[in-house]
Image (cartoon, rainbow, N blue to C red):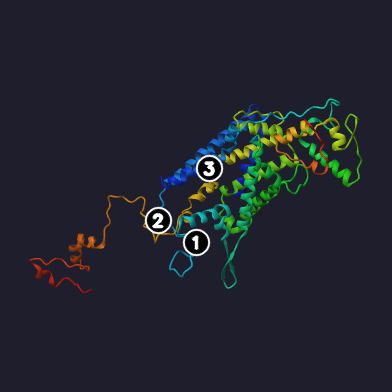
Amino acid sequence: MYDKGKIIPGLIVFVGLVTFPIWYGLATTAGPLPNPEKPTNAKECVEPVEFMRSSHMVLLNEWRDNIVRSGGTRKGTTADGTEYVRSLQKGCMNCHTSKKKFCDECHTYAAVNPYCWDCHIQPKETN
Amino acid sequence: MKVLQALGIVLALMLVAYVGAALPGGRTLFGVVLPYLAFAIFIIFFIAKVMDWAKSPVPFRIPTTGGQANSLPWIKQNKLDCPSTTLGVIGRMLLEVFLFRSLFRNTQAEVHEGPKLAYGSSKFLWLFGILFHYSFLTVALRHLRLFTDPIPAFVHALEFGDGFMQVGAPVLYQTDLVFMAAVTFLLLRRLVLPNIRYISLVADYFPLFLLLGIGTTGILMRYVLRVDVVSIKMLTHGLVTFNPFIAESVTGIFFVHLFLITVLLAYFPFSKLMHAGGVFLSPTRNMANNSRMVRHINPWNDPSIKPHSYAGYEDDFREFMVEAGLPVDKELPPKEEAPAAEGDAPAES
């Protein structure tokens, strides 16, 4: 083998880089799995759980575009006829009261940093 | 035909993953077993390939360069394109690896009326090549958010920078667009230009279709079908911490995406994609052009074979040379029967 002194360190660097997640996982302690707090005052959300889990951001985006840009209504009705307010702070957070205990649980886990709070004033939470 | 063949293979792979993951045991096979296997193949055969290359001796400096070599003092040397020092070689390698300098010099030949042949600079391959490589790197590093917990700061920074435009929700990543555009260009280049199409093989089209498939399924998962990213992270982070768990909500499209990456990893060490390791071993890039300053010994020289000069050669064969009438530097020593040989040797010629 030729140029051992350069090729072997190079290969070690290569293996170190591609196995980064493995040894990083060994070196760090993973936090608990996300467990968003369930609301106590309601049993159903505005859409089925599966939809909310994957597509709540699309819904919020639609509300924003509809209300802020097209002057749409604040009133929404679920499939079973319950009325709700189409609003992040007055609607969603009416049940999901805590940003920390609900939103941040999954967002932190998946490194999602939504820009809701660029405009909305973030609710103050003491704990 | 070769295009369709490559496309067909990729589509078949996608179908295999989609159907396979729905079969009993398929989720574990496509979600856990094959990714582990592919990753092992990737690392082991990548190393094996590089070691195999390292065993091939490179005899002499190859001064194939794009610039003026070190010469007389008043001739300016191009120190980056034709370095004669290790430092210069490091500079050339850095430019090659990070900026694809060789590709930047790409030219295109055109035949005009006359007929006249003209060479022009052609930067498109370099441009889309570098766009592709850097956006792919960014996409790959961004995926570390699914493989690490806690997530390192540089991943957050990439995430923020890549979604800087804040288009839609979930935010659009710019590299997604650049990646797809660049791969599409590289594919169209092979399809549209007749001379490139002529030399393109299935092995050229296949990685491009594979990457397009990976990009398309990834984009679909994020922006269109929208999968549950938390349950996916439970699987991906589980894979790297050797504790994989596949939640029910992980769906078919994810297995297609994952299987195409699995195939890419397993295919990598046996394909042209090995230029990732090969670029470091390019003799025309990684050797200093110093053959006039340093004596280089051919590495496969047999030490028992001694140098043999012309004088030595003539010593060995002088008699036969004189006999055949060949000119010699040194005449034969005079012998007893010298008069007999006198007239025969044409010493002057």
In front here: B41 or B196?
A: B41
Q: CA distance from mark 2 to mark 3?
A: 27 Å
Q: Where residue B245 appears, x then y in whole percent?
A: 65, 28
Q: Amino acid at mark 1?
A: Lys
On the same chain: label 2 and label 1? Answer: yes
Task: Please give the chain letter of the residue carrying mark 2.
Answer: B
On the same chain: label 2 and label 3? Answer: no
Q: Which residue has dot 2 on it?
A: B60
Residue B1 makes an appearance in the image: no
Q: Where residue A69 appears, x then y in whole percent?
A: 88, 47
Q: Where residue B161 appears, x then y in whole percent?
A: 70, 47
| Cβ–Cβ under 8 Å for marks 2 and 1 | no
Q: Is residue A117 left or right of residue B147?
A: right
User: Given the current orientation, which residue lies at the most extreme bottom position?
Assistant: B348
| Cβ–Cβ under 8 Å for marks 2 and 3 | no
Tell me the residue at 57%/33% (across/down). Answer: B36
Mark 3 crowdedness (10 Å alpha carbons): few <14, some 14-19, many ≥20: some
In front here: B148 or B100?
A: B148
Q: Which residue has dot 1 on it?
A: B79
Kindly identify which numbered label has been placed on residue A14.
3
